[in-house]
Image (cartoon, rainbow, N blue to C red):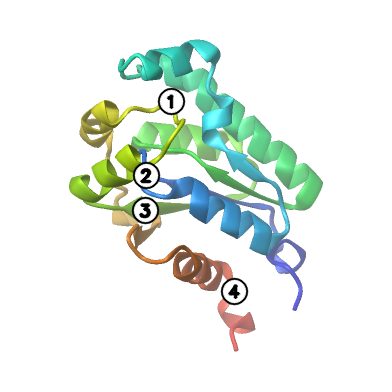
Amino acid sequence: MPSLAERSPAPKAVIVMGVSGCGKSTLGALLAEALGCVFLEGDAFHSAEAVMKMRDGTPLTDADRWPWLDRVAAAAAASIDTCGIAVAACSALRLVYRERLRAGVPGDVQFVFLEADRDRLIARMSARAGHFMPASLLDSQLATLERPSRAERVLTLPAQAPPDVLRDRVLAHLEPPALRA
């Protein structure tokens, strides 16, 4: 079966979104592998200053986020140029952030929102080692989060589902109906 990039008439980007600890990176890496492209880890595009702020427990501001979102969008555009598709993990917490990403990425952008309750997120964040994002910043992310509206056509999935099940649901969603068996 041809890859999504080979059978799609327009370049596409898949951006896995949600607050810290929801599983964006895990799902994004699985999707990138399945779609044959590089996985773009949104955290890698933060400035050193932004990482220091988060590590110190200071929430980011829009002024911190705009250049980061532009770097994520540029990397996705470059992946589309190279592979015909891009897969990225990016919190994309607010509608204006998602709009900024859509404006910077050529072609269709499909957001996948991983939704989880606060207790599950705290447990996940507390269990991971070596990440700069402390669990103390989760509440600021939850306060910033603007859940995607129906008009945005964002695929919303439960973060507690097994990663391979989430991957398969996203791939089925991306596949044109005429190609489904």
View extreme (right): residue: 82
Q: Earlier in the sequence, mark 1 or mark 3?
A: 3
CB atoms at circles 3 and 2 under 8 Å apart?
yes
* Front in this rendered view, residue 1 or 52: 52
**Residues at marks 3 and 2, CA–CA distance in whole angstroms:** 5 Å
View extreme (top): residue: 49
From the image, tell me which residue sits under label 4.
176
**What residue is at 77 percent from the left and 65 percent from the top?**
6
Q: Earlier in the sequence, mark 2 or mark 1?
A: 2
**What residue is at 19 percent from the left and 47 percent from the top?**
119
Q: Amino acid at mark 4?
A: Pro
Q: Earlier in the sequence, mark 2 or mark 4?
A: 2
Q: Position of residue 31 (x, y in %)?
A: 59, 58
CB atoms at circles 1 and 3 under 8 Å apart?
no
Q: Which mark is residue 114?
A: 3
Q: Position of residue 134 (x, y in %)?
A: 33, 27
Q: Earlier in the sequence, mark 3 or mark 2?
A: 2
Q: Earlier in the sequence, mark 4 or mark 1?
A: 1
Q: Is residue 85 above or below residue 161?
A: above
Secondary element under disc 1, as helix, strand or loop, is: loop
Secondary element under disc 2, as helix, strand or loop, is: loop
Quadrant of the snapshot with the N terminus? bottom right
Q: State the count of labels.
A: 4
Secondary element under disc 4, as helix, strand or loop, is: loop
* Front in this rendered view, residue 165 or 6: 165
**Residues at marks 4 and 1, CA–CA distance in whole angstroms:** 38 Å
CB atoms at circles 3 and 4 under 8 Å apart?
no
Q: Which mark is residue 18?
A: 2
Q: Amino acid at mark 3?
A: Leu
